[in-house]
Image (tube, rainbow, N blue to C red):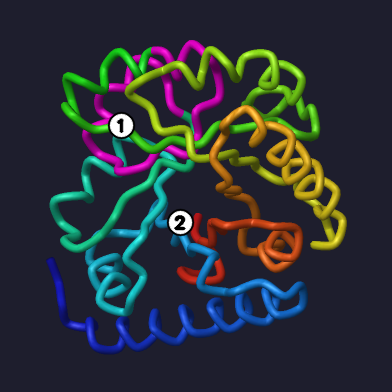
């Protein structure tokens, strides 16, 4: 693995991290929140391992991947990182996901939750696996996730899954021209979270990406998933 440009890369990532953390702090201040309550996940899909080594050295230690196979190819090459799955998970890759990721943010069906619960004791004995439930707040047919009413009905059985620690909700926002236009999605997810917390759901809200994470923070995001603003454009 080449380290020829590592000092420059570390400085590049440190500067990008400071810019994003500064924006997180400003958004939190606007609504009277503590910026320390907001976690930054650096979405690292398609970023090669040698660049991720530099990113981790710069403080970007929580990495989010969209595909199990890609993450598996990186984990051993990037020491010191905490890996999260933020993309879709096929049921037949559930066991591999449990091995590769500390947190699975994209549990989008009751069937997938049940499979993870059954496999967890084999892959991670003695541990309740942290997960988030993905919600298709906008009813977008192109996006995965529970519909809000369906999730409310399914939640009691999901909360009975002994090997999962259901920490909250996640959504993928709409593609919009203006970040402000994404606000309604984040408001809806926060409202759903508040209702479901009465039934024991955890308070985490993973919402907001490079274009709209400041709006998401204003509406209660506790986790933001930022890729392009940290790693640049990728193709």
Please give the count of numbered marks on the rendered protein: 2
Residue 37: within the magenta?
Answer: no
Determine whether the residue tagged by mark 2 lies in a helix, strand or loop: strand
Q: Position of residue 22 (x, y in %)?
A: 58, 83
Q: Is residue 121 above or below residue 217?
A: above
Q: Closer to the camera: disc 2 or disc 1?
A: 1
Left or right: 88, with 203 as reference point:
left
- Residue 95 painted magenta: yes
> Horizontal and vertical percent for residue 111?
48, 11
Which residue occupies 65% across, 23% down?
A: 146
Position in image of residue 229 (x %, y %)? 56, 70
CA distance separating discs 2 and 1: 24 Å
Range covered by the magenta-colored residues? 89-114
Q: Earlier in the sequence, mark 2 or mark 1?
A: 2
Q: Which mark is residue 128?
A: 1
Where does label 2 land, which residue?
A: 43
Does residue 213 sit above or below 141 in this rendering? below
Q: Are marks 2 and 1 in contact (CB under 8 Å)?
A: no
């Amino acid at each position: 693995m080449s380290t020829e440009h590592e000092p420059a890369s570390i400085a590049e990532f440190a500067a990008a991290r400071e810019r994003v953390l500064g924006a997180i702090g400003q958004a939190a201040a606007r609504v009277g929140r503590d910026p320390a309550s907001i976690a930054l996940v650096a979405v690292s899909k398609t970023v090669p391992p040698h660049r991720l080594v530099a990113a981790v050295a710069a403080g970007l230690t929580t990495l989010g991947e969209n595909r199990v196979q890609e993450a598996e190819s990186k984990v051993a090459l990037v020491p010191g990182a905490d890996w999260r799955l933020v993309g879709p998970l096929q049921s037949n890759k559930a066991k591999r996901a449990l091995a590769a990721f500390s947190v699975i943010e994209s549990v989008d069906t009751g069937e997938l939750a049940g499979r993870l619960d059954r496999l967890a004791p084999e892959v991670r004995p003695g541990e309740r696996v942290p997960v988030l439930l993905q919600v298709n707040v906008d009813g977008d047919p192109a996006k995965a996730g529970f519909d809000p009413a369906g999730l409310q009905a399914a939640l009691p059985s999901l909360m009975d899954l002994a090997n999962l620690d259901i920490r909250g909700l996640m959504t993928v926002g709409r593609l919009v021209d203006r970040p402000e236009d994404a606000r309604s999605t984040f408001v809806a997810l926060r409202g759903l979270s508040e209702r479901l917390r009465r039934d024991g759901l955890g308070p985490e809200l993973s919402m907001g990406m490079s274009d709209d994470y400041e709006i998401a923070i204003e509406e209660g995001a506790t986790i933001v998933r930022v890729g392009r603003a940290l790693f640049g454009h990728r193709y």
